[in-house]
Amino acid sequence: MLKAFIAIIVVGLLGAMGYLATQRESGRVTEVRVDQVGTRSLVAEVSATGHIEPKTHADITTDVAGRIIELTVEEGQDVEEGDFLLQIDPALFRAAVQRAEAALAQARASHAQQDAAYQQAQRDADRMTALQAAGTDFVTDVEVEQAVTNADVQRRLLEAAEHQVEQAVASLAQERDRLGKTTIRAPMSGRITRLNVERGETAIVGTMNNPGTVLLTVADLSVMEAVIEVDETDVPDIVIGDSAFIEIDAFPNERFVGTVTEIGNSSIVPRNPSQTSAQAIDFEVKIELRAPPEGIRPDLSATADVITDTRNNVPSIPITALTLMDADEYEEIPNENVSALERPETMRDIEGVFVVEGDRVRFRPVEIGIAGESYFEVISGIEAGTTIVSGSFQAIRELEDGSRIRIDRTESEAADEGGGGSGGNGP
């Protein structure tokens, strides 16, 4: 009897505790900030960092190795196309030209000698053939055949001598070209932005595994561009012709306008199959500056904001208001004023916002468009003027469809004054 009485008391206590927990849960109130769906002008941007470089520049290397015996320019000096820059010691190359000239003279002499031998052999063959045709007994058929064969051989030797002359001419042209490359002139008009050698140093020719010596760089500083590294997820949003705003660290408090002129077709660093997915994949994007400032130099650090899309006076919601809900936890309530969104049956997460209805919230799916700095464009799912929960982030995470709320009026009014209504969102 005592055991039954104790069991009844325990069951009663457990039931009471469950009832109290249920009451506390049903009476739970979440403090939130609210905002209204307003119309704003939105600007979608892709931000990336990079550096400044000239649009046109030439890294000057050497095609012949040798010691630099004369250097007439300094870094920062302006040059015109064709100006003399430096001289590599030409002594060995002049000797090579002289050898090639001598070889050509010898080949021409051999050609002249062979031409005389051919002419003599041809005359002998013609004479033997004429005597045979006259029917005389002065020559035999064998002698005629030998004379004709000898003339043919001499003709072939003459052709070989002609080819030797051509070969000698080509060798001389090659050596003269190598000699000419010891004198380096400016390939374009511009400024010497980098000078890597001094008089007396040895210039090295590049090979397959050695890029060789970059003697100096000539750049046209009249047209400059920002070269930025854009993440692979943002590259599809950028197209040729997009406008951009560039900030250069060396010119604080100034913004420069540019236009996207080139988008890399392959990543800056090729993907390595042996590395994990943590490897960053970036693409190079070039932005031409419309009015570069005075004193701009290559390699200056820069940050660019590429304008990928704009919207004028469209419904928008704060970025903090958008949340996700599991499709299994959401039961859509028909609304005759707002068309239902079409969702694939395989979709597990639904994007939406919490709409304020009295002291409770209802989850409503929305379709969003571009993302501005602080707001998302709303394509469908909710109307302008609707009151929604805009924060805090932790509060939105705790909310469920039908949760009770208490509005933080102070925070909501401050948010309205800061960015609510129909204010712009562009730069």
Image (cartoon, grey):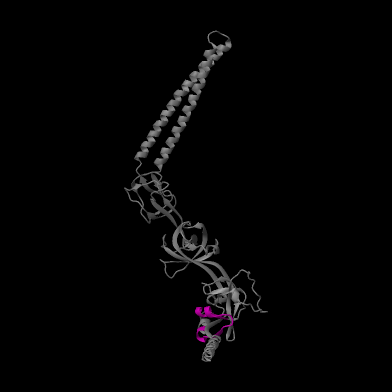
Q: Is residue 223 above or below residue 181?
A: below
Q: Is residue 39 visible?
A: no
Expressed as whole percent of the image width and height from the top left, the position of residue 51 reads: 44, 62
Q: Residue most toward the right?
A: 336
Residue at (52%, 68%) from the top-left corner? 45
Q: Is residue 84 magenta?
A: no
Q: Which residues are magenta?
A: 388-412
Q: Is residue 180 visible?
A: yes
Q: How many marks?
A: 0
Q: Nearer the viewer, residue 409 or 395?
A: 395
Expressed as whole percent of the image width and height from the top left, the position of residue 164 reads: 45, 30
Expressed as whole percent of the image width and height from the top left, the position of residue 165 reads: 45, 30
Residue at (41%, 38%) from the top-left corner? 175
Q: Is residue 8 above or below residue 209?
A: below
Say whether residue 379 is left or right of residue 286.
right
Q: Is residue 215 above or below residue 419?
A: above
Say whether residue 202 is left or right of residue 319.
left
Q: Is residue 405 magenta?
A: yes
Residue at (43%, 38%) from the top-left corner? 174
